[in-house]
Amino acid sequence: MRQHMFGDVAEMHALDMPNAWDAEAPFSANDGLVTDIHSAATQALESWIAAQDMFSRKHILNNFVSSDNNGDARPGAICASPSRKHPDYYYAWTRDSALVVLEVIAWLDDDTFDSVFKDELKQRLDAYVGFTRHLQGLKNLKYGLGEAKFHMDGTAFRAPWCNAQTDGPALRARAILAYTQHINKHANGDPKRAHELFALVRTDLDYVTKVWMHAGNCDIWEESRGMHFYTLLAQKTALEEGARMARTLDVDNDVAHVYERAAQEIAHKLPEFWDVDHGYIVATLNKTGGIRTKNSNLDAQVLLAALHHGTPKLLASRAVAATVNRLVHVFDRMYVVNHVQRTKIDGHWVDVAAAVGRYPEDVYDGDGSRGGNPWSLLTSSVAEYHYRLAVHMGNGPLAQYLVQVGNTYMARVARHTDADHTMREQWDKNSGYGRGAVHLTWSYAAHTSASRWRHLAITSLT
């Protein structure tokens, strides 16, 4: 099996909680299968990444309903996937949509895109704001703002589902806040518009302050009930950002105080997720229901939490490194596809890292329960993790090595992505072929996010 970059697993296992959270991980440029950053193989990978970027952006926007849509979907709705059977993912999940919007907003600051493309993005984002206002105004929802998903026409989904999912409103608030910040920065400020947007944010964050402590809410995989690391970190970050915006807009000071107090209370809860016996951050505490076979409590959603909502300090912590290290070790041995350590891209052999799944006990196969598989978006996320660490470390041999390791995860994604760049939710753990929902919006957004951070990491090396 391939070597890993975090050193001795036993060392990570033995960490006590204060050191795990506060100290940076002991990263080292281990010898192993890593393609040189300036090699022809790396250039072949870069060409694939660039082509995948274009394809991914196209399909993200295909799944993001525009204001001139003439179909049955409401403008501003974002489908998880256009797949309507085996599986049916043609719904607007609050969480998935907000994550996509945060990625699209990041494109607005990319100087390589022209004004025509950016105007199109702003039209989609304005439609998303309208869609948000519509959803917040729906009546007679059993779980209120915590409803996980909606039909694409903006009507309520009434069938049984794992609700409430209270990370959704927090993420949506963060998405609207990010758009507000962009408008304030690039439109010479529009106080009326900013206050209109903050009213939507406040609706979601007021809800978060009332529900964050509830232990019966569902996790992001819609399988477990309890207190979830991902959900709490999403809520904490949203409340902190909301408090800052409240002060910027000179909203009633009590609003900022309420949000800050709730964020502080959540912050006091988060260290409880460090499991000193297992040596990693667990996904869920105080389980009250849902899947009962998830005994390890080791889950890639912890990495997603750090990427989506964590500070650079948290991302570079020993606690997150230990968790990622354990995930990679487990999946490296679980999946047959990980026996392959090189792939050919445009005639060049490129080293590949392990394909990564959700959690070891997973049984969801994309359209049934015959056994879990690696996920495209999660493997892209491990790539992004390394690129962001490289940015954090700055210029130097270690940062260069982190970029090289990130490249091996991107190469793994390239190996299992369709030749025409179509992405799916999962890859079969034995054959490596795509499984589950086709054109999964989150898979495309995870790729473009990893690619953006790769660019930033490489730029920091020059």
Image (cartoon, helix red, strand yellow):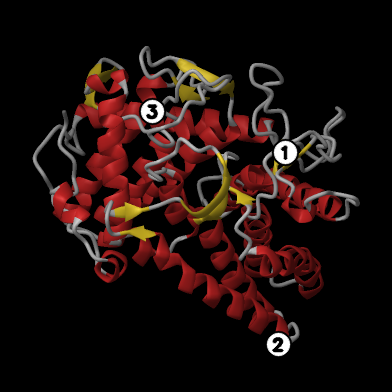
Number of the label disc, if any, that sits on residue 92? 1
**Residue 339 percent location from the top left of the image:** 23, 20
Which is more foreground, mark 1 or mark 3? Answer: 1
Determine which quarter of the picture holds residue 277. Answer: bottom left
174 left or right, relative to 16? right
Q: Compute the Cα span from label 1 to label 3.
A: 25 Å
Residue type marked 3: Val
Viewer-side residue, 29 vs 55: 29
Q: What residue sits 23% from the left and 25% below the top?
A: 350
**Residue 383 percent location from the top left of the image:** 35, 41
Label 1: how many Cα within 10 Å (few below 14, some 14–19, many 20+):
many
Residue type marked 1: Ala
**Residue 85 percent location from the top left of the image:** 69, 17
Q: What residue sits 28% from the left and 71% below the top?
A: 18
Residue type marked 2: Asn
Cβ–Cβ under 8 Å for marks 2 and 1: no
- The local secondary structure at tag 2 comes to helix
Q: Is residue 435 above or below residue 1?
A: above
Q: Compute the Cα span from label 2 to label 1.
A: 34 Å
Label 2: how many Cα within 10 Å (few below 14, some 14–19, many 20+):
few
Disc with the residue nearer the chain's start (1 vs 3): 1
Determine which quarter of the picture holds residue 37. Answer: top left
Disc with the residue nearer the chain's start (2 vs 1): 1
Residue of label 2:
253
Residue of label 3:
413
Q: Compute the Cα span from label 3 to label 2.
A: 47 Å
Number of the label disc, if any, that sits on residue 201? none
